[in-house]
Image: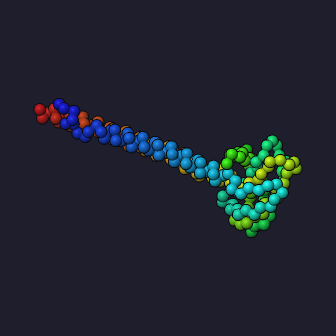
Amino acid sequence: MDPKELRPRRRWIAVAWGVAALCLAAGVVLFFTSVMTTVGEVAPTTTFAPGETTTVSLDPAERPAVYISGTGQIAYECEIAGGPGQARLVRPTTTQNVTADGRLWELILLVNAPAAGEYQLTCAVQEQGDVQFGVGRDVLGAAGGIVGGVAALLLIPGAGVLVAIIVTVIVLVKRSGHRKRLAAMG
C-alpha cells in the first residue's frame, strides 16, 4: 500500500503544529508588548524639580502616585492642593522602582484624590543634588495590563497546542481507518 494513498494527508499534522508555533509566538509578543506598555503607563509622565509647583490632572481610578529620582536616601516633603476635594498623600506599604528613559524612579507617595481634577503638587528636599520628582501610576493601577499579558502568554499558545493535539489525533485515527479500508479492498 502506497502511503500517498492514505487520507487525510500527514501535512495536516504539520499545518496544525505550525499554527501552534504561530500561537506561541503571538502569545510571547503580546505578553512582552503588554508588559512594556504597562511599564510605560506606570512611569512618571509629569516631572518637576524640587521646590517647583506643578499642576497635574489626576483621576483616582488610575491610582496616581508620586515618584522620586536621585541618588541615596533623600529627605523630602510634598504637599498637594486644589482639585474638587482635599487630596491626601500617603506612604505606600511596598517598595516599587521603575526605570524609564534611563532614570530610576522610586515610588514614595500614593495620591488619594477624592475625584478627578486638576491638583497642584509641590515637593521639596533638604539637600541639593540631581533630584527629580514625577507623577505616574501605582503598579497595582496598571496590573490589568500585566494580567492581560500573562493571559495572552498562557491562553493563546495553550489553545494552539490543544488544537494541534486534537488535529494530530484525528488525522492519525482517520488514516488508520482509511488504511484498514484500503487493506480490506484488496
Name the residue rendered at 41%, 42% in the picture: 20
Frontmost residue, 14 versus 143: 14
Residue situated furthest right in the rendering: 126
Give above or below for 3 relative to 12.
above
Badge count: 0
Picture coordinates of residue 38 (x, y %)? Answer: 61, 51
| Quadrant in which the C terminus is drawn | top left
Frontmost residue, 162 versus 74: 74
Give above or below for 161 relative to 134.
above
Residue situated furthest top in the rendering: 1
Name the residue rendered at 74%, 47% in the picture: 106
Name the residue rendered at 39%, 43% in the picture: 19
Q: Is residue 76 visible?
A: yes
Give above or below for 119 relative to 28.
below
| Quadrant in which the N terminus is drawn | top left
Picture coordinates of residue 3 (x, y %)? Answer: 22, 33
Q: Is residue 162 visible?
A: no
Picture coordinates of residue 77 (x, y %)? Answer: 84, 53
User: By what rule are the colours in the image chosen?
Assistant: rainbow
